[in-house]
């Protein structure tokens, strides 16, 4: 099974992707994580990418399409994958369709996670991640059971993203509405789109997604 989680920054794509990995054994392909790894590597490309990420702008379609094509070609993706953060433009959506066609792969689900803009800034600015295993948390909405200790691996070091500040979030939301929201219509027209209420509690959203993946829920 191959699928896309589609939604604005802070919609809960990464949170739900981790649950889908746990429950369905798919591989999470987060283009944001891939780009941050490239920045952390200190390469010349990474340095250029850092400026784009910190400004809350989109990286070029050419770079992103090549990055995802290389990743999908890797053997672990045969188990099925969740695209988290890709596609983000119409050009990326069209290129993805061509890539999947060429490889004879299906796109089984495109799930839109709808969240009000007003909730997103609080979600993004309160987000943090376990430095050891990558589990996601939130200052108010998803705290570890024991303060300062990761539920997943027991790690005690956490990181926050440099682009998760109110100013950059405003630009990321602007980019979402201008460039990414139109692809919701692209998938709706193709009859592939399902929708969940991303404003609901995390476990409620997980249940809504499971219903869709198990063959229930109407296309919108
Ligand atoms: P995205 O990957 O779409 O940018 P995340 O999954 O990282 O978003 O979620 C952003 C933040 O909001 C995280 O700190 C996460 O714990 C929290 N979060 C995710 N889903 C919900 C939800 N349904 N309700 C409240 N907080 C949520
Ligand atoms: P994310 O982790 O999905 O919030 O992405 C973080 C940042 O990485 C974004 O604000 C963009 O700068 C960049 N990015 C991630 N995915 C893409 C993509 N598909 N196209 C363009 N830029 C992207």
Image (cartoon, grey):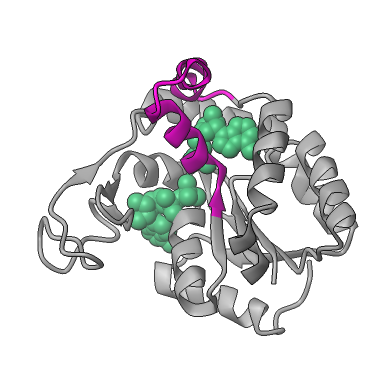
**Left or right of 105: which side holds 111?**
left
Find residue 152 and report its image quarter: bottom left
Q: Is residue 153 above or below residue 203?
A: above
Magenta part of the protein: which range? 29-57
**Left or right of 157: which side holds 26?**
right
Q: Where does residue 21 sit, x and y in percent of width and height?
A: 49, 69
**Left or right of 148: which side holds 101?**
right
Q: Is residue 48 magenta?
A: yes
Ligand 1 quadrant assignment: bottom left
Q: Determine the main secondary structure of the stretch shown in magenta.
A: helix
Q: Is residue 111 above or below residue 37?
A: below
| Residue that sits furthest to the left in the current view | 147
Q: Quadrant of the N terminus?
A: bottom right
Which residue is pictured at 23% across the width and 51% down the height?
139
Q: How many marks?
A: 0
Which residue is pictured at 73% across the width and 36% down the height?
89
Q: Where does residue 31 sit, x and y in percent of width and height?
A: 56, 42
Which residue is pictured at 28% across the width and 61% down the height?
142
Which one is in front, 175 or 28?
28
């Amino acid at each position: 099974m191959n699928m896309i989680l589609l939604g604005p920054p802070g919609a809960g794509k990464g949170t739900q992707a981790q649950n889908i990995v746990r429950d369905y054994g798919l591989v999470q392909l987060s283009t944001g994580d891939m780009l941050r790894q490239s920045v952390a590597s200190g390469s010349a490309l990474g340095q250029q990418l850092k400026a784009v990420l910190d400004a809350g702008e989109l990286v070029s379609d050419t770079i992103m399409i090549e990055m995802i094509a290389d990743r999908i070609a890797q053997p672990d993706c045969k188990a099925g994958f969740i695209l988290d953060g890709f596609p983000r433009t119409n050009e990326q959506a069209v290129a993805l369709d061509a890539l999947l066609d060429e490889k004879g792969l299906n796109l089984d689900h495109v799930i839109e996670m709808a969240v009000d803009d007003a909730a997103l800034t609080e979600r993004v600015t309160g987000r943090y991640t376990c430095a050891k295993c990558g589990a996601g948390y939130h200052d108010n909405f998803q705290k570890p059971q024991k303060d300062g200790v990761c539920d997943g691996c027991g790690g005690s070091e956490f990181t926050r993203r440099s682009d998760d500040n109110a100013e950059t979030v405003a630009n990321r939301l602007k980019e979402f509405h201008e460039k990414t929201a139109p692809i919701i219509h692209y998938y709706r027209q193709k009859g592939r789109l399902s929708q969940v209420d991303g404003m609901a509690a995390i476990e409620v959203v997980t249940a809504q997604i499971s219903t869709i993946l198990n063959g229930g829920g109407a296309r919108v």
